[in-house]
Image (cartoon, helix red, strand yellow):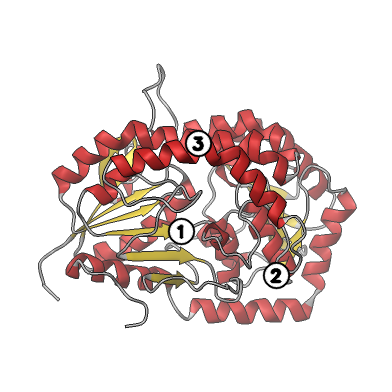
Amino acid sequence: MSERRPTVVFFPEGAYGPTNNCVGIAEVLVGRGIRVLFVVEESFAGTLEAQGFEEALMRLAPAPEVPEEPGQFWKDFIRDTAPEFRRPTIEQLATFLLPTWTALVDGARFVNDRLTEIFGELRPDAIVQDNVVCFPAVAASGRPWARIVSCNPLEMADPDLPPVFSGYPSADRAGWEEFREEYRRTHGGLWNGFAEFVAANGSPPLGDLEFMNESPFLNLFLYPEEADYRRAMPLGPTWHRLDSCVRRAATSFEPPASLRGDGALVYFSLGSLGSADVGLMDRLIGILAGTPHRYVVSKGPQAGLIRLADNMWGEEFVPQPAILPLADLVVTHGGNNTVTESLHHGKPMVVLPLFWDQYDNAQRVDELGFGVRLDPWTCEPDELAGAIDRLLGDDAAGERLEAVGSRIRSDSGVRRAADLIEQLARTGRPVDAHR
């Protein structure tokens, strides 16, 4: 390989999950002397710079009249559409999924010229994007590029697997075709127009009803082998699995004195978007307050409105990478990062899915015995408290999870991703998993 210092540009979706994944990989690359830049929304300006990275700024929509918090658009969007999350997933296709895809597609159209400018100026040796929609400027740049899938791997469709976003069981095909037909009915028109835009702006054609295409160079997906699905159609040779992608803990964590006691230590997080629903947070905190356990709570963007019980401690932002190794159990919304990081550390989960692929993650965790899936709005207090107690008392499941976590921790996904991306940046050639 050439010893020239390559440049790698990371382009994550404007949310903390994908951004944190990319940060962990980028830190390894910087340590190897590779120049790393991040393409980020203006609302994230300074966030990556504070971690030592260069930034190139862009917008996915016209600038607001008042300054934004990082990822504010999606926080507002989720808040306004939250009532739809109480519907069955097939009904959400029209009421939540379609508006979400529409907003994503609109963003890709709006930013295309700016991305073309950025890639033309930087001339990177590789572009790494973690997005669910295609940004034609990436492929049209003529630079080698990698795709990271940091959502549930049902995003890569397969006829023998449940449809993505359904939360349906893997062992029961009831409803699969009905869901797929409803997805086509509700999303076909949007997809047709977007596919034309993508092709007209220099990107390879999209697959049928796919809003993102795979890279001809390198594709990475984030899911442990023990939790992954068996496919009828194997993924292509440029696809590589990352069992986990746990970023380095930026700070240490010790439970505060107020949480010292005999109860189990439980980490509770609905993610940066889910925790914005104050009513839901209050409901769940009220249930957990009646249990004998101790809770570290990620309070999220509405931290000032959330009141914790005496057996709890929390802040707006908590150091999840430092907390998880200490936790006995995780109560989570089922975001891909938290699920895979919990498995990385061998922790059982109670999963309370809210939207997107969280239903799929919750179902997978439940059907594999790694935890329990519950409805966050309708679960009774004894259901949630009982699930926590059952999981904490299941020694056999705990030993199995610890074995899974030990195996995952033995093979650093962050380092493996950095190896593959560095190979792409230095050679400019497809990275074949079979070579």
Q: Of callouts 2 and 3, which one flags the residue occurring earlier in the amino acid sequence?
A: 3
Front label number (2 vs 1): 1
Q: What percent of the width, then of the height, locates residue 300?
A: 58, 40
Q: Residue at x 37, y 39 (%)?
A: 196
Question: Is residue 269 at all visible to an observer of this figure?
Answer: no
Front label number (1 vs 3): 3
Q: Quadrant of the C terminus?
A: bottom left
Q: Find the distance from the CA under tag 2 to the CA under tag 3.
A: 37 Å
Q: Quadrant of residue 29?
A: bottom left
Q: Quadrant of residue 41?
A: top left
Within 10 Å of disc 3 (Cα), the crowding (few <14, some 14-19, many 20+) is: some
Q: Residue at x 35, y 42 (%)?
A: 198
What residue is pinned by disc 3?
Answer: 190
Residue type of the residue flagged with mark 2: Phe
Within 10 Å of disc 2 (Cα), the crowding (few <14, some 14-19, many 20+) is: many
Q: Is residue 264 above or below residue 317?
A: below
Q: What percent of the width, then of the height, locates residue 256?
A: 62, 54
Q: Is residue 84 above or below residue 347?
A: above
Q: What percent of the width, then of the height, locates residue 24?
A: 38, 60
Residue type of the residue flagged with mark 1: Val
What residue is pinned by disc 2?
Answer: 370
Disc sitting over residue 149 in the figure: 1
Nearest the camera: 360 or 134? 134
Q: Of callouts 1 and 3, which one flags the residue occurring earlier in the amino acid sequence?
A: 1
Residue type of the residue flagged with mark 3: Leu
Instruction: Using residue 409 as the reference point, say whether residue 400 is left or right of it.
Output: right
